[in-house]
Amino acid sequence: MTALSIGKGITLNNAEELEATLRHIGATRYHSLHPFHRLLHGGKLNKGQVQAWALNRYYYQSTIPLKDAMVISRFRDRATRVEWRHRIEDHDGDVGSEGGIERWLKLTEGLGLDSAYVESTEGILPATRFAVEAYVHFCRDKTPLEAIASSLTELFAPNLHEERISGMLQHYDFVNPDIMSYFSRRLSQAPRDAGFALEYVKAHAKTHAEREAVCNALIFKTNVLWVQLDALYHAYVEGHIPPGAFVPKGD
């Protein structure tokens, strides 16, 4: 595989080979492998660095409903729209019910960040904005099949969430179970969403070219997630914070 595609020599003759390749992509490219996550989960970051991560990640989380609305707009099939719609509700919430965005703001507030500042997204890294907007554009411009395939990183999310919950609660005295509620909730939501997306691409990617496009969509999405951590590492671990971005107190 290359940095951007599965390359040549990979067989995708049927749905089973497609799933095997998708799982290999996750095993080798998912951002759980990134050095920044190892620092985060291992208690190696200071509070300001954890704040920077949560602040930047908010932009991704708050954009997910926009991305999912874009996916819904690609389908005339009512059943697919109905199935996908709950993803928006999961993040936006509903009348009288808390959604993922509110739970993420609970995290940033618990870390000591002002919610108005977080929601403004004024302090996020340029690379964060570019990567997240590229994801929305991908779901708008590529085929509906590729738009659904790009969500398949959720296949690998539960293990990461479990590692994050246990690691951060163990290592940081400024973290408690209440502010980690976003991740505990996703332990049940992500497998449901990933299961639908996986079965969808296996059923609808009928040609080798379509299966290859599905795999490349997942590679694209892993790159979207990975580059955000590259930017965080460069800015807040190596110390190269770009002009205008969030600067932790005391740094």
Image (tube, helix red, strand yellow):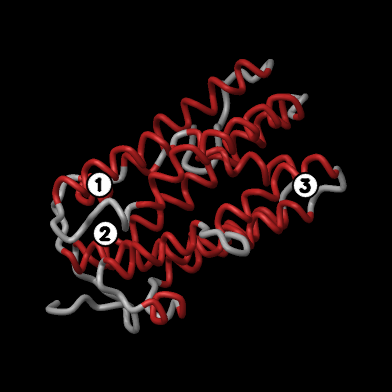
Which residue is label 1 attached to? 35
Name the amino acid, label 3: Arg
Which residue is label 3 attached to? 81
N-terminal of the two: label 2 or label 1?
1
Q: Which mark is residue 233?
A: 2
Q: Position of residue 225 (x, y in %)?
A: 44, 51
Name the amino acid, label 2: Tyr
Q: Position of residue 239 (x, y in %)?
A: 19, 69
27 in relation to 222, above or below? above
- Residue drawn at x 32%, y 53% is 180
Which quarter of the figure has residue 200?
A: top right
Residues under labels 3 and 2: Cα distance?
37 Å
Name the amino acid, label 1: Pro
**Which marked residue is nearer to the observer: mark 3 or mark 1?**
3
Secondary structure of the residue carrying numbered label 1: helix
Looking at the image, the residue that sits furthest to the bottom is 244
186 in relation to 48, above or below? above
Crowd rating for badge 1 (residues with CA inside 10 Å; few <14, some 14–19, many 20+): few
